């Protein structure tokens, strides 16, 4: 099973406590760890977390710098957590356009966790669904100039073609938008919105996602 999560509400969580937005993101990172462990224990094989979108660069520079700092410094510092929980980390998005320090940290984390097989966690960073489709098309055209492009060609040139499409995409903080998340492979994903702000997520919310999916009848355009 592949679960995709749009993490929303870090800012609201912080402002409810009169804390700076950065405090919400830090707490959001703790929620990521709880959710990863819960998902693994409940049998989720792939978990994609929407960490930073191609549109998030529009945020105030201070907030962008803080999030990039989390990626560059906190992410590789969690190696023991990945090892103890058998977590493989992969990335999806235009990571080559990130600050060099963040890129190096991502590469290190990917390499150090490559042998883990308890759960695959995919961090979508500088990720946009439209951007990914455009990059997939460019990759194909570069290899096959002048050829018409098929659905399968796009599929095979996505960032992580080996990862199955998400079964369920859920969003926190009560919002009901995809916000450019996994546009290509969300074609037949189920969707769920939960009111809890992202920093409050843990076991209970992951269970709600899995329960919701188990009740959906999936027809993929056919008949039940
Ligand atoms: C959405 O809340 C959250 C983000 C844009 C960033 C997500 C980042 C984290 C959860 C922490 C970093 C995690 C890792 C793995 C390094 P928002 O700021 O849009 O909240 P708001 O809508 O209430 O303002």
Image (cartoon, grey):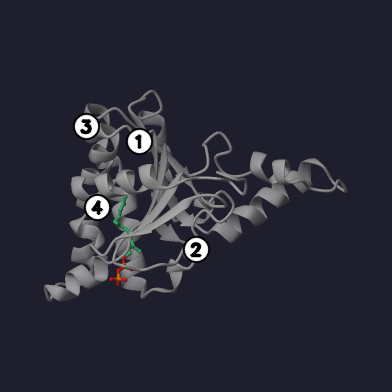
Q: How many numbered circles are shown? A: 4
Q: CA distance from mark 4 to mark 2?
A: 19 Å
In which quadrant is the N terminus drawn? top left
Tell me which corner region of the image, top left, top right, bottom left or bottom right, holds residue 60: bottom left
The furthest residue to the right: 146
Q: Marks 1 and 4: CB-CB under 8 Å?
A: no
Beta carbon at label 1 within 8 Å of ligand 1? no
Frontmost residue, 123 versus 194 = 194
Q: Earlier in the sequence, mark 1 or mark 3?
A: 1
Name the residue carrying label 4. 29
Other-residue count near label 3 (Cα within 10 Å), few / some / many at <14 / 14–19 / ≥20: few
Name the residue carrying label 3. 80
Tell me which corner region of the image, top left, top right, bottom left or bottom right, holds residue 79: top left
The answer to whether residue 16 is visible is: yes
Name the residue carrying label 1. 44
Name the residue carrying label 2. 54
- In the image, which is nearer the foreground, mark 1 or mark 3? 1
Q: Earlier in the sequence, mark 3 or mark 4?
A: 4
Question: Looking at the picture, does residue 80 appear above or below residue 215?
Answer: above
What secondary structure is found at the residue carrying circle 3?
A: helix
Frontmost residue, 31 versus 70 = 31
What secondary structure is found at the residue carrying circle 1?
A: loop
Q: CA distance from mark 1 to mark 2?
A: 27 Å
The answer to whether residue 74 is visible is: no
| Image point (32%, 64%), residue name | 8
Q: CA distance from mark 2 to mark 3?
A: 30 Å
Residue 52 appears at what percent x and percent y?
41, 59
Residue 26 appears at what percent x and percent y?
21, 58
Residue 177 appears at what percent x and percent y?
44, 67
Beta carbon at label 4 within 8 Å of ligand 1? yes
């Amino acid at each position: 099973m592949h679960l995709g999560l749009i993490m929303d509400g870090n800012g609201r969580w912080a402002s409810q406590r009169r804390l700076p937005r950065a405090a919400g993101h830090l707490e959001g990172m703790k929620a990521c760890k709880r959710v990863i462990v819960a998902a693994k224990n409940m049998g989720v094989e792939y978990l994609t977390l929407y960490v930073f979108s191609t549109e998030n660069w529009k945020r105030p520079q201070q907030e962008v710098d803080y999030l990039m700092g989390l990626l560059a410094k906190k992410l590789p510092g969690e190696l023991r957590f990945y090892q103890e929980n058998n977590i493989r980390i992969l990335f999806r998005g235009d990571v080559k356009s990130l600050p060099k320090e963040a890129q190096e940290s991502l590469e290190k984390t990917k390499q150090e966790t490559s042998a883990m097989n308890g759960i695959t966690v995919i961090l979508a960073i500088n990720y946009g669904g439209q951007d990914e489709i455009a990059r997939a098309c460019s990759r194909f055209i570069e290899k096959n100039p002048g050829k018409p492009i098929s659905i399968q060609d796009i599929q095979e040139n996505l960032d992580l073609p080996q990862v199955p499409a998400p079964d369920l995409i859920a969003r926190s903080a009560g919002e009901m938008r995809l916000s450019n998340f996994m546009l290509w492979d969300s074609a037949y994903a189920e969707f769920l919105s939960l009111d809890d702000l992202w920093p409050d997520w843990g076991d209970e919310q992951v269970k709600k996602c899995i329960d919701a999916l188990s009740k959906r009848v999936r027809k993929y355009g056919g008949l039940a």
